[in-house]
Image (cartoon, helix red, strand yellow):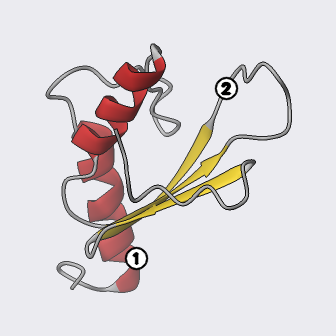
Amino acid sequence: MFPDLDLNDPTWGNLEDPDWSIEFNIGREDPVESIMLHVRGGGDVVEVIQRAARALGCRALDGSSGEFIEDGGADGWADFQAYRDSVLGQGGVS
């Protein structure tokens, strides 16, 4: 599903795109009960997160709102980017 996912360390995966990066904090437990994603950058990364959740047979939870990310829903990510850009004094990230 994600051929570019770097799992050299099976407890901590890394997926990179020119606009964003996602670190997959998988941990050492077997079976895996949850994975924390650390998302950085800009652009539309929500679809990637949703594809990963579907591939794993789970749902993605937006840590900032406590709500599940629904299909087509990117409000939390858009809100985060707007907040981040206002704190950094930028109109957008290049």
- Where on the picture, by quarter, is residue 27? top right
Q: Residue furthest top?
A: 57
Compared to 91, does 59 lie above or below?
Answer: above
15 and 40: which is toward the camera: 15
Residue 40 shows in this picture: no
| SS category of the residue bearing label 2 | loop
Q: Amino acid at mark 2?
A: Ser
Left or right position of 51 against 55: left
List the residue tagged with mark 2.
34
Residue 74 shows in this picture: yes
Residue at the (31%, 31%) spot, across then down: 50
Residue at the (20%, 30%) spot, across then down: 73
Q: Which mark is residue 87?
A: 1
Callout in the foreground (2, 1): 2
Residue at the (14%, 28%) spot, across then down: 72
Compared to 21, does 68 lie above or below?
Answer: above
Q: What is the count of numbered marks?
A: 2
